[in-house]
Amino acid sequence: MSQLWIATLLSSLICFFLKYLGYRIPESLLNRPVIQRINSLIPIALLSSLVAVQGLTIEQEVVIDHRLVGLLVAAIALGFKANFPIMMLLAAASSAAVYNL
Amino acid sequence: MAVAIPVGTYGAAFGAASIAAGFSILQTCLLSLLLFSGASQFAVVGVMGSGGSALSAIATGSLLGFRNGLYGLKMAPLLKLKGFKRVIGAQLTIDESTGVAISQEGRGDEAARYGFWATGIGVYFFWNLFTLLGALGAGAIGDPAAWGLDAVVPAAFLGLLWPRLTDNKTRILAISAAILALLLVPIVPAGIPIIATALLAVIFGSRAKQ
């Protein structure tokens, strides 16, 4: 089985299992303040590093290119409370414009 | 349905990004049908697309999926599900359905339950429909960068991150995580820099009360 299939099926299985687990375990087990705090912070750390890695690296190098323009435009759009579709379109359009220069 | 358009755009972006990362149309659609959690799906295709191993893709996706389990804890006493309905309810337990259910709690349990199911089913339908459209669309265009697709993925992560940056602590964590990841990129295999930043969240969360 290829790596892509393994990633597709195993991540689906584990993510479903995590959802289902929430309905099967007693609430007291995870309802501790420290767990709640870490749980709300993990997405922040992962999403932020994903922004950086997906926007600023190619393979194992840090690279500044057209994607950074798209990201900056996205950040400005989010700062102006643009909704999701508008923000994505602006990011794609600005990045593509710089790439096609 | 107010959620349909943003979910549709985001789903189409996922479909396209997944194809650009090398996944087939079938694999892309299976991720939306079976995994069904936007951030985790983007993470899996993002890590694989940047050359990471399946193991780091699975680990990153699962770490991001952990919060759905805690949503389930919150939803279980409200929904009181058994058997097959519990399987369906669990699969639909995501940011949007949980968020709507919680926002409706003031109007009674019935309204909260309705909010959960209506949002969960609506998002599931549009997310999967637009994943397929995005995947088909991406197959039809040539170079993803020429269409700005390579910027769409980090922009999508930024859009998910933005509303979570509510105070200085979360902003400092976000910036530290981004810097740590970039420092690690040249020296460890792809995928690891992202997982490593989860440790920062654990450190930030175990210290400091606020």
Image (cartoon, rainbow, N blue to C red):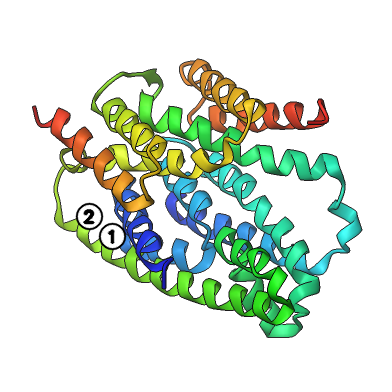
In the figure, is residue B197 to the left or right of A71? right
Can I make out residue B82 in this image? yes
Q: Which residue is mark 2?
A: B138
Residue at image position (31%, 67%) is B132
How crowded pointer 2 is (Cα within 10 Å; few <14, some 14-19, many 20+) is rated as: many
How crowded pointer 1 is (Cα within 10 Å; few <14, some 14-19, many 20+) is rated as: many
Q: Secondary structure at mark 2?
A: helix
Residue at image position (37%, 50%) is A83
Residue at image position (74%, 84%) is B83
Q: Which residue is mark 1?
A: B135
- Which of the 4 quarters of the picture holds residue B102? bottom right
Residue at image position (51%, 26%) is B189
Q: Amino acid at mark 2?
A: Ala
Q: Is residue B201 above or below residue B135?
A: above
Q: Which mark is residue B6?
A: none
- Which of the 4 quarters of the picture holds residue A91? top left
Are labels 1 and 2 assigned to the same chain? Answer: yes
Q: Quadrant of the N terminus of chain B?
A: bottom left
Marks 1 and 2 sit apart, C-alpha to C-alpha, by 5 Å
Q: Quadrant of the C terminus of chain B?
A: top right
Q: Secondary structure at mark 1?
A: helix
- Where does the image place residue B75, in percent across and percent down from the top left? 73, 68
Which chain's residue wears label 1? B
Given residues B154 and B143, the one toward you in this image is: B154
